[in-house]
Image (tube, coloured by chain):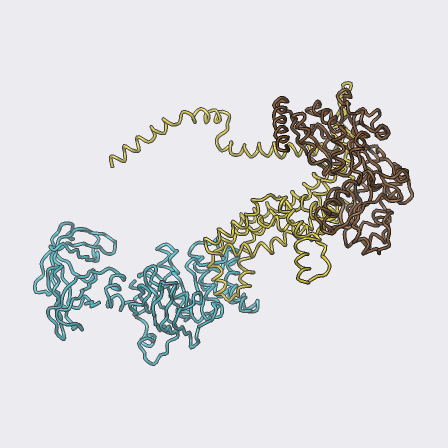
Chain colours: A brown, B cyan, C yellow
Amino acid sequence: MKKLLMLSAALSMGASATLAQETTLNIYNWSDYIAEDTLEKFTAETGIKVVYDVYDSNEVLEAKMLTGNSGYDIVVPTSDFLQRQIAAGVYQPLDKSLLPNLANMDAALMEGAANYDPGNEHAVIYMWGTTGIGYNVDMVAERLGEDYEVNSWDLVFDPETVAKLADCGVSLLDAPTEMIPAAMNYLGLDPRSTDIADFEAGAAHLEKIRDSIRYFHSSQYINDLANGDTCVAVGWSGDVFQAMARAEEAENGVEIGYVIPREGALQWFDMMAIPVDAPNPEAAHKFINFIMDAQITADITNYVWYANANAASMPLVDEEITSDPGIFPTPEAKERLWGATVYDARADRAITRLWTRVKTGQ
Amino acid sequence: MSEQASITESKPPESKPWIDDTQQPFIRIRNITKKFGEFIAVNNVSLDIYRGELFCLLGGSGCGKSTLLRMLSGFETPTSGAIEIDGQDMAGLAPHARPTNMMFQSYALFPHMSVEKNIAYGLHRDGLKRKEVNQRVSEILTLVQLSDFAKRKPSQLSGGQRQRVALARALVKKPKVLLLDEPLAALDKKLREETQFELVNIQETLGVTFIVVTHDQEEAMTLSTRIGVMNAGEIVQIGEPREIYEYPGSRFVADFIGSVNVFEGQVTEEDTDFVIIRSPEIKADIFVSHGVSCTSNQKVAYAIRPEKIRMSLERPKGVKNLLSGTVEEIAYMGNLSVYQVKLATGKIVRVTQPNLVRTDQNSITWEDEVSLTWDGAAGVVLTS
Amino acid sequence: MSGQAKLSEKLPEKSIGRLPFAAPLGGALARLGLGPRALVIAIPTVWLLVFFLIPFVVVAKISLSEVAIARPPYLPLWEWQDGILSLSLNFGNYLFLASDPLYYSAFLESLTIAGFSTLFALLIGYPMAYMIARAPGGMRNILLMLVILPFWSSFLLRVYAWIGILKTNGVINHALMSIGLIDEPIVMMQTDFAVYVGIVYTYLPFMILPLYANLVKLDETLLEAASDLGAGSFTTFLTVTLPLSLPGIFAGSLLVFIPAVGEFVIPALLGGPDTLMIGKVLWNEFFSNRDWPVASAVAIAMLFVLVIPVMLLQKAQQSDGGHS
C-alpha cells in the first residue's frame, strides 16, 4: 500500500514537472527554518523546482537585497528590517487574489505585523518567536548552584553571574538591533527607544560582560548547545528548541532549557516577501500560498519548534509545542514582550557602529 | 714542459724524501677500500706521501681518485683501512676537524659573500681575532694577486680569478695538506698553463703538501713531484713524472700517459745484457740492449714513444731496429709533426719529428717510403 | 653534400606553403603596430585593466560616496539636474577610518597575526622544505605530493575539520582527558590560537613550495666547503644555507603574509570576538553594517597600507639582485 502511494507520488511529480516547463523558484530563508519535506511537497504539488539558500542574519540579507539582482523570488526578513527595505523599494506588493490561504492567518498577529507593513501589502508572517536564553541545565547548575532559577537576563547581563559561566561558553547573537535593546531593557530603559544615548548605555553595559562572551554568532550556537560545547546562548526560541531536539536525538546527556526572561524579551515576526526584481513572482505567490496551508505550516512548526501565525493550523500542531510557554508565551509573559523598532539611517548607523565596538572590544 | 722538467730535476736529492729510507711519510694511506653498495670505488690502496710534496692522483673518470681525495678530506668514510696525517689517525674525524683543506673542482665559492669574506670564512670559524683575520686575508690576497678584487662577489670575477680565490680560501687556513680536486679543469688552455706554474710557485713558497686529483696527464706531469696513476680503484704505478713517462710499468700506464706505440711479441733470445723480441705485428725482431726479467718464449709487449723513433727517406745501414713503411697521415702541430706510418703488415706506427726548419722543403711528405729506427734502449718491455 | 643542399632549398618552400593562415593575421597586427611582442604585453595589461584597475576605480568611487538605505546602498557621486552637474565627494569615510581606533587596531592586529603566522609557517615549513629537498629522488616526489595533497579537498572542509579537532568536546580535548593529562577541557576554539593554527595550516604549502624550489637548487659542495673550512653543521646552516635561501624565504613569506593579512574565513570560523582582523572588519562593514562607502574606504586604505610597501620591497630586492 505504501509502495503504491510512493509510486503514484513520483508519477504525479514527474507529470506536473513537465507541465510546469521546468520553472524554478529561488528561496533565501533563515538556516534551520523549514520542515524536511516541505520543499518536496511543494515541488510535487506544483512541479516547480526549488533552489533553497540560507542565511543567519538580517544584515546579510539586507546587504544582498540592497545590492539588487539577488535572483531570489522569496526572502524572509524580520519585521523591522522588512519595513526599512520596503521604504528602500526592495519588495513588490503581493497580489492577494493569488493567496486564498490568507484566510487561515491569525488576524491579531497579522495586525501586529501590519505595524511594519501597513495593510500587510508586501509580506505574510512565516513564523514568529522571541529572543531569549538557551542554556545547558547541568552546566549552569554546576556553576551557579542547584537552586539557581534561570528566569532572568541576570544569567548573561549580570557581570558576576556571567563571569562564572565564561569557562563553559557563553554566546550572544550577532544582531545589533536585538542585543543592544535587550541590554537597554535590562538597564530599565525603553528597549524601543531610538535615542542614541540609550544605545550607548546598552552598548556600554554589553562591554562590561564582553570578556565573558566566547563568540557572537547567530546560528552556530544551535550545534554548540546541543553538543555541550557551550552552555549559555542568547538565541531565537525555535533554534534553542532545535538544539534541545538534537541533543535528545544524539542521546549525549545534554539537557537544554529555553527561557523568556521575566524582564521581557523581543517578539519578532519573520515575513515572507517577494523582491521587486524576483525572476518568478508567480511561483513565489504559489509558494507563499502553499506555506499558508494549515497542514504545511503545522508540519514546519512541528519540525522547527517556532510558533506560526496560522490560526487554522493550530489544531494540527503538537500539544507539546502549543503548551510550551517558551514557544507560545503565557498571557502574562506576552505582556512583557516588545516589538522591534525600526531605525532610520542615522540610528541604524549608530547602533551598528556601537555593536562593532562591542564585538571587537575596541 | 721543459721548464717544468727543470724545476723538478733541479731539486737536490735530499728533496726527494721518497728515495730516502730515513724519511717518515707525512701521510700514510693503509689498505684503504671504499665500497658504494656492491661497487668498489677504491680497492685496497696504500700510499705514502711526504711533507712538501705535490702529489698528483691521475686517472680517467671513475677510477676512484676523487673518492680517495674525499676520504682524505673526510667527506667519505673508508669502508676499511686507515689514513694517518702527520702521525694522527683520521678515523672518525669530521672534515672541519682535519688538518686538511680542499679546493673544489667547482671552487664552491659562497656566492653571497665577497672575495675577502669568502677567504675570511675559515679563519672566523677558527675563532681568530678580527685583526689577525684581516691581516691574513690581505696577505693571501697579495699572494694570489687579488688585492684589488677583495670587495667583489664571485659572480663579478673571471674564471681564473675565481680559481685563485678558491685556492686562497683553502690556503689561508694554513692546512697541513691541501687537497685540490681538478684545480685547473675549468680554465681554458692558455690560462691553465700559466696557472700551473703559479700553483707550483705558491706550493713551493708555502711548503704545504698538495694532493691534486686530475685526469689531465700533462697537468700531472707539469705539477707533480710524484704521480700516482689510478685505474679501476687501484693505484697502478707511483713515480716521478719522468719515471712514469719513460718507464711505465704496465700497458695501461704507457697508454694513459702520453702517446705510445705498442708491438706485441714473444721473447726469442734472452741474455743478461740484451733481449730479442719477435713481433709478427711488424714482421721484425726487436733488439733490446739491456737485460729484462723475463723468460724465453714469454709473450711481452714492447712500448716505444713516437719521439724516440727516427725516420728517414734513406735506409740506414748497420742498425738493429729497422722498419719500413709508407707515410699515411701527417699532423702539423707547430713545434713538431706527427706522422702515421703504415707498415707492410698494416700496423700503423706513430712517429714525431721536431720541426727544425721553417720551410717544408726536402721534408718527408705523404706517400713517401720511409725507414724507421730506434736505439736498443729507447723502448720499454712490458710484461703486464 | 648535394643532398644537404637540396634539402635546405626545399625547406623554405615548404614553410611558405604552410604560412597563408598566419600571414594575414600577422600582417594585420603589424599594420596596427602590434608585433607578437606587443601582444604578449597587451594580454596581461588588458587583464589588469579589466580585473584590477576597473574594480579598483569602482571601489574608490564608492568610498567617496555616502551610505543610504537604498538600492544600491549609497548615494551617487554626481547628479545632473537642470543642466548643472553637481559632484559631491565625501571624504568623511576616510576621516572616519582615521578617527575610529577600530580600523587602526584591526590593521595592526591583522599585520601582527599575519606576521606571526608567517614566522610560524617559516619555522615549520623550512625544515620540511629542507628535508624534502635533501630526500632521494623518488621519495622527494612523494613528499611534495603530500604537501600539495590537502589542496585536493575543499578549504572550507579542512577548516571545519579543525573545528572538530579544536573544540571543547573535540578530538584533542577528548584525547588529553582520556589519558588523564587534563581534567577540564582546554578552550581552543574561538581563540587566537585557533586562528594561528588555521592560518599556518592553510598557508604552509605556500611557504614550503618556494622554499623547496630554492633549497633543491642549493649546491651541496658549498656545504662541504663550509664544513671543510671548519664550520659545524649549525654554523654551515646559518652562514651558507640560510643566506642563500633568502629569496625562497622572501617569496614564501610573501605568499603566506599577503593572503593572511586579508584572511576572513579562518578568523570568522575559528577565531573569537577578540580576533580583530581587517578581513572580518571588511565583511562586517559590507554585510552587518551595510556601509559600502566605509567598507570601500577600508579596502582602499588596506591597499595603500599593504600592497604598496610590499611592491617597494620587492622592487628593492629586484634591483639588489640585479647588482650582484
Position of residue C162 relative to residue A56, above or below, is: below
Residue B181: x percent and y percent? 40, 62
**Place of residue B384 in the rendered image (x, y in percent of width and height, measured from the top left):** 22, 67
User: Residue B37 versus residue B105: which sits nearer the camera?
Assistant: B37
Q: Is residue C144 above or below residue A42?
A: below
Q: Which one is nearer the viewer's eye here, A331 or A60?
A: A331
Taking A15 as reference, is C125 above or below it?
below
Quarter occupied by residue C96: top right
Q: Is residue C177 above or below residue B367?
A: below
Q: Residue at x 35, y 55 (%)?
A: B190
Q: Is residue A64 left or right of residue B116?
A: right
- As drawn, the residue found furthest toward the left would be B317
In front of the other: A156 or C23? A156
- Horizontal relation, residue C197 to residue B170: left or right: right
Q: Is any atom of residue A84 visible in this view?
A: no
Q: Is residue A227 left or right of residue B104?
A: right
